[in-house]
Image (cartoon, coloured by chain):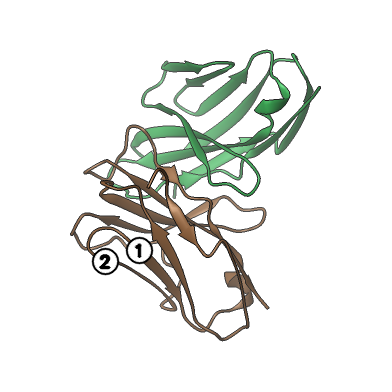
Chain colours: A brown, B green
Amino acid sequence: GAGVSQSPSNKVTEKGKDVELRCDPISGHTALYWYRQSLGQGLEFLIYFQGNSAPDKSGLPSDRFSAERTGGSVSTLTIQRTQQEDSAVYLCASSLSRGRFSNYGYTFGSGTRLTVV
Amino acid sequence: EDQVTQSPEALRLQEGESSSLNCSYTVSGLRGLFWYRQDPGKGPEFLFTLYSAGEEKEKERLKATLTKKESFLHITAPKPEDSATYLCAVQRGGADGLTFGKGTHLIIQP
């Protein structure tokens, strides 16, 4: 597609439920990132995928968070047993870079706004 | 630990009134400093990458500069459509992710 697509755009869930957030990167982009943007906070790095290499999960805040990327394309971020502090906008980004650094930054999707009630 | 501090948090200007946004950073081994623009309900949009002190980049009414401790985003004769949140981020050599500041919310009044 022309841009990074994320779904759903909004998700309201009850505390304790599991949620799955989806990201479709730009076709041909090998690098994919997940970030979290909480109210009043800067974007927080969560996880990085590069091609078929093992992902960098160093930014995941707890073991309730996991992500996978199938076929080097679509990625799913899963949050188990959601808590109120998980409420945030979850942003996915992709880039053409074949290394960890992209001279042209990333292309971000519009995000999924997650509200845990 | 990498740190990025942006100031001011919010800035209101009249159309045509030039100003500068500041991004102060602490990072060991800067690989690149990025500026993004974010509109409400949208993801950040890439503007510039700066690599080393003394570098400058321009795009329309925007010019970004970099020193060893900070970066400035200069906005010349802004228009209402320049209203957005401007985000600064750094990437350390060897790191996969960016460290972002909290942003400057810029409002340009007609």
At numbered mark 1, what does the secondary structure look like: helix, strand or loop? strand
Residue at position x 27%, y 62% in the image: A55
Choose top left, top right, bottom left or bottom right for residue B5. Answer: top right
Vertical side of A104 occupied by A85: above or below? below
Alpha-carbon neighbours of circle 1 within 10 Å: few (<14), some, or many (≥20)? many
State the residue position of label 2: A70
Vertical side of A107 occupied by A8: above or below? below
Residue at position x 51%, y 45% in the image: B100
State the residue position of label 1: A75
Q: Is residue A103 left or right of residue B68?
A: left
**Whole-percent x, y for residue B72 in the image:** 56, 24
The amino acid type, in three-letter code, at marker 2 is Thr
The amino acid type, in three-letter code, at marker 1 is Ser
Q: Is residue B40 visible?
A: yes
Residue at position x 70%, y 39% in the image: B9
Q: Chain of mark 1?
A: A
Vertical side of B6 occupied by A28: above or below? below
**Whole-percent x, y for residue A22 in the image:** 43, 65
Q: Is residue B94 left or right of residue B105?
A: left
**Whole-percent x, y for residue A110 in the image:** 53, 51
At numbered mark 2, what does the secondary structure look like: helix, strand or loop? loop
Mark 1 and mark 2 residues within 8 Å of each other at the beta carbon: yes
